[in-house]
Image: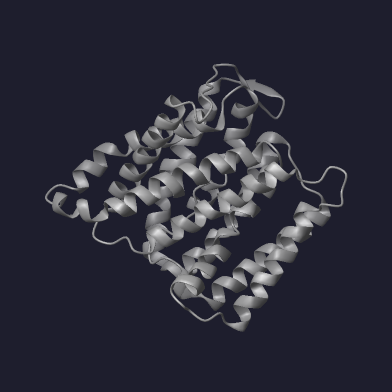
Amino acid sequence: MLTSTAAFGSAGAFAKPLLEAGWSPASLVTVRLAGAALVLLLPALWSMRGRWSRFAGHLPQLLGYGLFAGMVAQVAFFNATTTMPVGMAILFEYLGIVWVVLWGWLVRGKPLKRVTLIGMALAVVGLVVVVNPAAPAGISFPGLLWGLAASLGLAVYYVVCAEVDGIPPVTFVSFGLGIGAIGLTILQALGLQQVALSTAPAHLQGTLVPWWIGVAGLILIAAVLAYLSGFFGTQALGSTLASFVGLTEVLFAVIWAWALLGETISPLQALGGAVLLGGVAMVQQGDTSALPEALPEPVA
């Protein structure tokens, strides 16, 4: 699980220099999703031998996974990183756990425990401190909206994956990410999303590196390694413990952003992030049944 969260945490650090070099978020996410789907395609097909009759029953889950948990969450997250530090963008995304609890309350009629309500209040307080609207250089309103959209994408991921059963994990990831890549390709072909790719070198800690290094990192580390190790870790630890370990992605995202981009956040924002994460942890503790039984890994 730590391997998985460390790999997921690298996504923003690999993506931000490419976005600054001229890539559009939609094009970069398309390449990431399609690349990971193709890398996993052969083992995905091998795993499905003799099980194709189960595929049709999982099509709605695959569509939700690819179009919302993959496409929407990642495009929103990458857009958020263009308006704020990577570490802050990942904090926004993890509010998705709170949306999952609210979904269980509103849709399934599950009562909210006291510890859950306290955790949600702490998460909101921490978010306000992180956003710091009174500061002259506070987070922009578009950045706030992109961050919240990323959190909703993560929430869809949790809800969809909670019901996955009977299809090999590698097949679910490969086909789901492939659907997300196809959806984004259609949106770009229709002009609803900007198409922009670049072979210009990217800046990592002041050093120019070839564009393909960042793309390879996004595909192989932040997607393939992240998802597969997350599957194995979840199977070994169980969903509840694995989801708590998943919170370490925020720490890894900050470390990656510092190591590759030289980004830091203020001490006050770090305190707000700690309060936010503490609140999310309390929400998880009070509503563990809202967490998935498989794949509780983020999409960023």
Residue 99: where, in percent of width, then height? 55, 63
Residue 141: where, in percent of width, then height? 72, 45
Q: In this view, does 152 lie to the left or right of 266?
A: left
Residue 287 versus residue 264: which sits nearer the camera?
A: 287
Q: Is residue 114 above or below residue 12?
A: below
Residue 242 versus residue 119: which sits nearer the camera?
A: 119
Residue 190 versus residue 16: which sits nearer the camera?
A: 190
Residue 103: where, in percent of width, then height? 50, 67
* Res 251 seen here: no
State the residue at coordinates (40%, 40%): 180
Residue 127: where, in percent of width, then height? 72, 59
* Res 107 seen here: yes
State the residue at coordinates (71%, 70%): 122
Residue at the outermost left position: 50
Quadrant of the image occupied by residue 24: top right
Q: How is the image coloured?
A: one colour
Q: Is residue 261 above or below residue 247?
A: above
Q: In this view, does 158 lie above or below 281?
A: above
State the residue at coordinates (45%, 42%): 223
Q: How many marks?
A: 0
Q: Is residue 169 left or right of residue 10?
A: left
Q: Is residue 262 left or right of residue 81?
A: right
